[in-house]
Amino acid sequence: MLRVLPQNLINQIAAGEVVERPASAIKELIENAIDAKANRIDIKIEQGGKSYFCVSDNGKGMSPQELSLAIERHATSKLPDDDLVNINFLGFRGEALPSIASVSKMTISSRTPQSESGWKIQINGGVKNNPEPSSCNYGTKIEVQDLFYNTPARLKFLKSDQSEQMAIRDIVDRLAMCYPNITFSLENENKKLLNYPATQNLFDRVSMIIGHQFKENAVAVQTEHDNIRLSGFVGLPTYTRATSTEQYLYVNGRYVKDKVLLGAVRGAYQGLMGHGSDGHPVLALFLSLPNRLLDVNVSPAKTEVRFQDAGKIRGLMVASIRNALAEHAQQTATTIHIGALGSYQEHSTPYTPLAKTHIPKSIPSPQPMFQMSDSFSVKTQNQPKEEKTTEIVVFPPMGLAKAQLHKTYIISQTTDSILIVDQHAAHERLTYEKMMKNLGEKVQTQLLLVPEIVDLKPEEVSLLMDRSDELNKMGWVLDAFGPDSIAVREIPALMDKADLKQTIQDLADTLKTFDDTVLLQDKMKDICAKMACHGSVRAGRILTIDEMNALLRQMEECGTSGQCIHGRPTYITLKLNDIEKLFGRR
């Protein structure tokens, strides 16, 4: 039987679209406060927002008539001309308050600057009372208790208090970044989590949220074309994070997750840094354009947009980012024609271990005692300076090292080829395979004589401390060192001389992507990959011939040494035939 649904049920259905979790409800309330011209917004939560949250502001407030109307669905003051094309506010659908109120116990207190007293209204599961006088400050205060208490199916899908709290922090960070002229604070059960004082300097607010290291490793972007303006800051290609969580993109003051913008970021950094699995750029970009060129009415959560000319936006972003990076980094070019590289790539195939080859004594052949440390430890045989022999030289499968170029590439000679080996990529693969082989065994650790202090965000410190027991079993002994730093006291022996600060940051970034119910043991491949990257010999480090040969011998023993853990080749083969063709000898 066809029927019209009750209004309260309609609101609950709308709540399923607008209110996914406490963080999404708080986002809607903060956006309302921004639209109300507040210059201070305070958020308080309990139990990750599940039992209680409150958003208060010092904005323009509401009269008692507006209080009652605000709970009605599709009631809004943000479309004065009924024009869905020209939207100048963050919230405009009029769904947030009635949707949240339909699945919670809500109290709204508000007072306009012109009023001598305030008013409040209470709503329980969508059923509202009449407004009544209340003693309150200028602005609006919205308190929400027991979110989803009357819709248990939604309640059971919420995560732990810690996970919900982190989601709220992320929402506050993303909104606070775009509005530096507003003071933001976040408090959890009387404990201050965030405090961002108002500032006129956008870079200061961005650095407060991303971290002071970003300020030292970022360049400004400032471009305007055809009334489209792009501004903000992008990290250098060498300054990356393990995940893309530190990419902040805004369109007309609205935080968005847009495929066009994300694709433009990837395109701008293409060729300047490794592929996505190797690291993600860190940036905060703010795009402004006329409303007629943009559709923000795409989804109830208002985090998606649609551009009238997506190609133009992408082109502007790619060019602007690349120009900004080019102004602050020396550019290099290859000296070999790009067409010639095709023949090289044909031989970039995974290496398959061969039977051990007899090596004549006339060839230097170090026997490695390979250790995952800052240097390769090898034993070498004493060889005469000059030894004449008619014995045919038989090279090992990966050849013998002859030189190191640009402190990054090992040049090796085989019977009929020249190998170019990426020392970091190769050692990274070997480190990873050794880690994976030793899983389940007792991890050998190394005590640091002086603990390494790593600065992190407070939520990242909490995340690592919550997993400290699991990390300890992996060889990491960490202690909280104040609210925003970690003291590293012991590390896995395999990580000797690694970039500890970057490894800890990557661990924190990786943990953010895990559900709090996931055991680290179940994600060891991801974690070992991050650790192997920073525990490997880096590009830019000078190696001796013995160290280079030790690496080559270990590659011969590893069946997967042809690719690094990100899927790129660890070496390429230049056949003599191909080289001779380049010089016209064939």
Image (tube, rainbow, N blue to C red):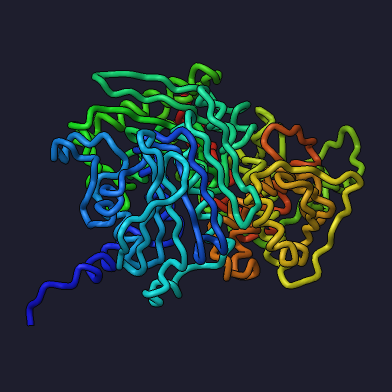
In the figure, is residue 380 to the left or right of 331?
right
How many badges with numbers are in the image?
Answer: 0
What residue is at 81 percent from the left and 44 percent from the top? 452
Residue 123 screen position, x and y as percent = 35, 63
The picture quadrant where one finds residue 502 is top right
What residue is at 64 percent from the left and 45 percent from the top? 457
> Is residue 288 depicted above or below 354 in this figure?
above
Question: Where does the C terminus fall, quadrant-wise?
Answer: top left
In this rendered view, identify the residue nearer to me: 72 or 85: 72
Residue 87 screen position, x and y as percent = 22, 36
Q: Residue at the far left: name it.
A: 2
What residue is at 53 percent from the left and 30 percent from the top? 198
Question: Where does the N terminus fall, quadrant-wise?
Answer: bottom left
The picture quadrant where one finds residue 576 is top right
In this rendered view, identify the residue nearer to me: 130 or 366: 130
In this rendered view, identify the residue nearer to me: 9 or 23: 9
Residue 563 screen position, x and y as percent = 56, 51
In this rendered view, identify the residue nearer to me: 410 or 214: 214
The picture quadrant where one finds residue 222 is top left
Residue 262 in sight here:
no
